[in-house]
Image (cartoon, rainbow, N blue to C red):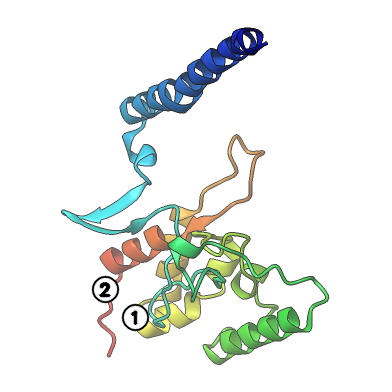
C-alpha cells in the first residue's frame, strides 16, 4: 500500500516542482529580461527624473495643491496619493458620504475660481486605485484661469500647453483623451515659471 501511494505521489510532486520552476521562475525571468531590453522605461515603473533624483512616475498620481499647478483627481489611497495603499472609496452611488465628499470638492473647486459650467467629474470623484495620473482635457482646461492668474501668464499659453500634451485614445478607439498631470506640471514649470508674486 505504501509503495502504491509513493508511486502515485511521485509524478504529482515532480510535475508540481517542474511547473513551479517554469511558471514561477523561468517565465517571469524571461518576460522581465525581454521587457528590460525592449522597453526599459516602462519596465522599471516609468520613473521621472531630474538628473539623478527621482521625482515621480508617469503611472502614479501625486498631490499637487498649489494654485500654480494642475490638480490631479482626488485620491482615496491611504491619506491621499499613497502608492503603498492604493484603494478606492468603495462607496455606493447612493451613499450620503459620497454625495457629501463630491459636494465638498465642487465647493472647493468653485472657491479656487472655477466658474461657469459644471466641474468635470474627474476632479470631484476618486478613481478605483486612488492614484490615477491622468485627467481629461476638460478637467485640465477647467483649471486654466487659476493657473494663468497664479503664474502671471496668459490663459492662451496654458491652454496651448494642454493641447500639446493631450494624448488621444490608443488607435483612436481604446481609452479616452487624457493628459498626464505630473508631466503637464513639469512642462508648465519649464515653459511658464512662476514669476508672479
Q: CA distance from mark 2 to mark 1?
A: 7 Å
For the point 46% across and 69% down, the residue is 81
Q: Which sits in the foreground, 140 or 153? A: 140
The crowd level at tag 2 (other Cα within 10 Å; few <14, some 14-19, many 20+) is few
Q: Position of residue 103 (x, y in %)?
A: 69, 86
For the point 72% across and 79% down, the residue is 98
Relative to 132, 125 lies left or right: right
Element class at badge 2:
loop
> For the view shown, which residue lies furthest in the right direction?
94
Q: Quadrant of the N terminus?
A: top right
Which residue position is annotated with label 1?
151
Among the 4 quarters of the image, the one containing residue 122: bottom right
Q: Quadrant of the C terminus?
A: bottom left
Q: Which sits in the foreground, 113 or 28? A: 28
- Residue 17 makes an appearance in the image: yes
* Whether label 2 touches label 1, CB < 8 Å: yes
Q: Position of residue 45 (x, y in %)?
A: 38, 46
Element class at badge 1:
helix
Relative to 28, 132 lies left or right: right
For the point 49% across and 74% down, the residue is 80
For the point 57% across and 71% down, the residue is 76
Q: Which sits in the foreground, 50 or 77? A: 77
The crowd level at tag 1 (other Cα within 10 Å; few <14, some 14-19, many 20+) is many
First-in-chain label (2 vs 1):
1
Q: Position of residue 44 (x, y in %)?
A: 34, 42
Among the 4 quarters of the image, the one containing residue 82: bottom left
Q: Position of residue 187 (x, y in %)?
A: 33, 61
- Residue 116 makes an appearance in the image: no
The label on residue 193 is 2
Amino acid at each position: 500500500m505504501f509503495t502504491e501511494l509513493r508511486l502515485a505521489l511521485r509524478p504529482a510532486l515532480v510535475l508540481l516542482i517542474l511547473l513551479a520552476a517554469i511558471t514561477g521562475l523561468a517565465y517571469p525571468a524571461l518576460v522581465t529580461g525581454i521587457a528590460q531590453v525592449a522597453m526599459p522605461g516602462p519596465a522599471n515603473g516609468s520613473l521621472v527624473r531630474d538628473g539623478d533624483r527621482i521625482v515621480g512616475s508617469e503611472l502614479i498620481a501625486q498631490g499637487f495643491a498649489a494654485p500654480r499647478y494642475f490638480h490631479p483627481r482626488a485620491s482615496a489611497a491611504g491619506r491621499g496619493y499613497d502608492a503603498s495603499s492604493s484603494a478606492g472609496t468603495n462607496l455606493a452611488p447612493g451613499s450620503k458620504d459620497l454625495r457629501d465628499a463630491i459636494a465638498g470638492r465642487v465647493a472647493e473647486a468653485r472657491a479656487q475660481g472655477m466658474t461657469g459650467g459644471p466641474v468635470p467629474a474627474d476632479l470631484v470623484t476618486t478613481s478605483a486605485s486612488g492614484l490615477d495620473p491622468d485627467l481629461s482635457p476638460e478637467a485640465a482646461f477647467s483649471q486654466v484661469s487659476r493657473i494663468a492668474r497664479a503664474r502671471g501668464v496668459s490663459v492662451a499659453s496654458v491652454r496651448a500647453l494642454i493641447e500639446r500634451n493631450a494624448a488621444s485614445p490608443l488607435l483612436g478607439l481604446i481609452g479616452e483623451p487624457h493628459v498626464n498631470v505630473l508631466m503637464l506640471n513639469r512642462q508648465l514649470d519649464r515653459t511658464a515659471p512662476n514669476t508672479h508674486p
